[in-house]
Image: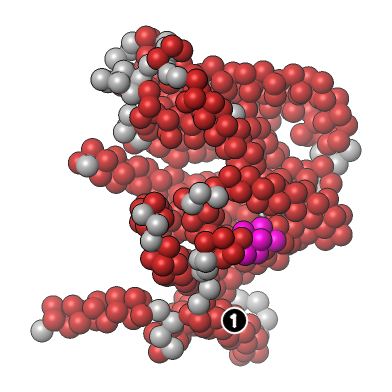
Amino acid sequence: MGVIARQSIKGALANYAGVAIGFVTTFFVLTRCLTTEEVGLTRVMVDAAVLFSSLALLGTNSSVVRFFPYFSDGGRNRGVFGLSLLLPLVGFGLFGLLFLLFRDGIVGLYEGRSPLLAEYVGLLPMLVFCAMYLTVFETNASVLLRITVPKLVREVGIRLLTLASYVLYGLGWVSFDGFVWLFCGSYGVAMLLSAFYLLRITGFDLGVFKVDFHAIDRRLWGEMLRYSLLMTAVVIAGNVPLLSTLFLGAKTGLAATGVYAIALYIANVVEVPYRSLGAVSRPILAASAKSGRWGEVNRLGRQVSLHQMLVSLTIFFLIWINLDLLFSLLPNGEAYAGGAGVVFVLGLAKVVNSSFAVGADVLNYSRFYVWSLLFALVLTGAALVCNQWLIGVWGINGAAVATLLSYVAYFLLLLWFVWRRLRVHFFSVGQVKVVAVVAVGLLLGEAWEWGVGKLVGGEYGVGMRIVLAAVKTVVLGGGLLWAVVKWRVSDEVNELIGKTLRLNKANKG
């Protein structure tokens, strides 16, 4: 447990360091050094690489984690690492074949509205290969309880390397062609660093990659194959937001995609606490489900859903009431201010996902976990249809609405199924109270802006904007907190605040 605790803490620190670097890079370097079209190119290339590499993995990363205990024997892994290298190679071969067959069609799809992407689409296979094996080496290190260095490479290393490419291009020291190669090469460097680290922690023993096919019975091979195929399909659902980026590049051009990318980054902040809170709740839910304590799962699920909604909606509220200030501080912020509607809609989509993703966790821990495949296909199908339809109608706002509608359709079906089969639901009166409080807060935020505009009149400087935004955040944020406590939205939150106040009072005394 000491190793796990240390690695978890170090991994979390690497994540937060990456978020900090990503914030500075995205808002104050990327928007200054690149045009909206160039931002769109980098976003589409990365999203396409993530999507196709996830499929090319053939579920290997999930299978290695789940089945590693079956292979591990006296410190040896009996070739699970070797399998993790071979299976993705098969998947990449299939991707490469399809890419060669349909390359002309892909170029034709994008060259009209996104000629820059059509020009550099030939780099996509290299980017897919690097992203795929970066995940493989990171997963292999994680099952050996060594996650810190791979996390640093992914969260910090790639961001620093891409940051360097932005700066070099912004200073005019490299051409745009050189920038694109440097940008894509960042993932290649990260892959090599992760591979070197994996070799180092295995003592540079290449024998760990030898597959012992006779040591594992056929039943386990079959189970691994079924699980891998299931995870290959499910992974598409986890990458639904990436589909909007690819559709936008083809239908509206890279400039609009760049605006959407910045708006998406802002909206993603809403979901950050979900990653930590979900990691804490899943083991408890899994243990209760395994023991058949579905009443406990029901209680825990409602509790998790309520607090996920409370936190995510609060962050969404704070972002929205300060969004104009954020765009005014961005270099070339006027070019990205048109993405405000995208931030609002995608923010709501992130709230929905954060609040009800616990339903997917519960389903996966039950005997009905295979149904996850059907719901993943529903989510993917809804995203494809809605993007195809709505982007042509509303542009980047249509892409955001498509994501929101896809999530709503997905969770309505999934939560209905979980209720019918397991008698577990995730709705509570507290959630209605949270929505009501935040809705009133948003209306007050609009009234505040109208009142300040009348009082101050006209345009005013950045310093005054920051002061007024700080006052608004304190007043409205404090009012939201007061309403949550006064209305007893959550007994746990009230108890936590009460303990904190009593502790502070005792310390002062």
Question: Is 410 within the magenta?
Answer: yes
Q: Which of the image's four quarters has the C terminus?
A: bottom left
Q: Which residues are magenta?
A: 409-416
On-image quarter of the N terminus: top left
**Front position in the image: 114 or 470:** 114
State left or right for residue 408 relative to residue 437: right
Q: How many marks?
A: 1
Quadrant for residue 268, please give it: bottom right
Q: Position of residue 210 (x, y in %)?
A: 42, 10
The residue carrying pointer 1 sits among few (fewer than 14), some (14 to 19) or many (20 or more) residues within 10 Å by Cα, namely some
**What secondary structure predominates along the stretch shown in magenta?**
helix
| Residue at left offset 34%, top offset 76% | 492
Q: Which residue is mark 1?
A: 439
Element assignment for label 1: helix
Q: Amino acid at mark 1?
A: Ala
Looking at the rendering, which quadrant does residue 40 occupy?
A: top right
Q: Can the viewer see residue 490?
A: yes
Q: Nearer the viewer, residue 293 or 176?
A: 293
At a point 43% along the width and 38% down the height, the residue shown is 156
Residue 442, relative to residue 358: is it above or below? below
- Observer-nearest residue: 305 or 3? 305
Residue 480 on the magenta segment: no
Which residue is painted at 75% across and 49% down in the image?
A: 381
For the point 74% across and 42% down, the residue is 246
Q: Does 164 sit left or right of 91 as displayed?
A: left
Residue 396 to residue 102: above or below: below
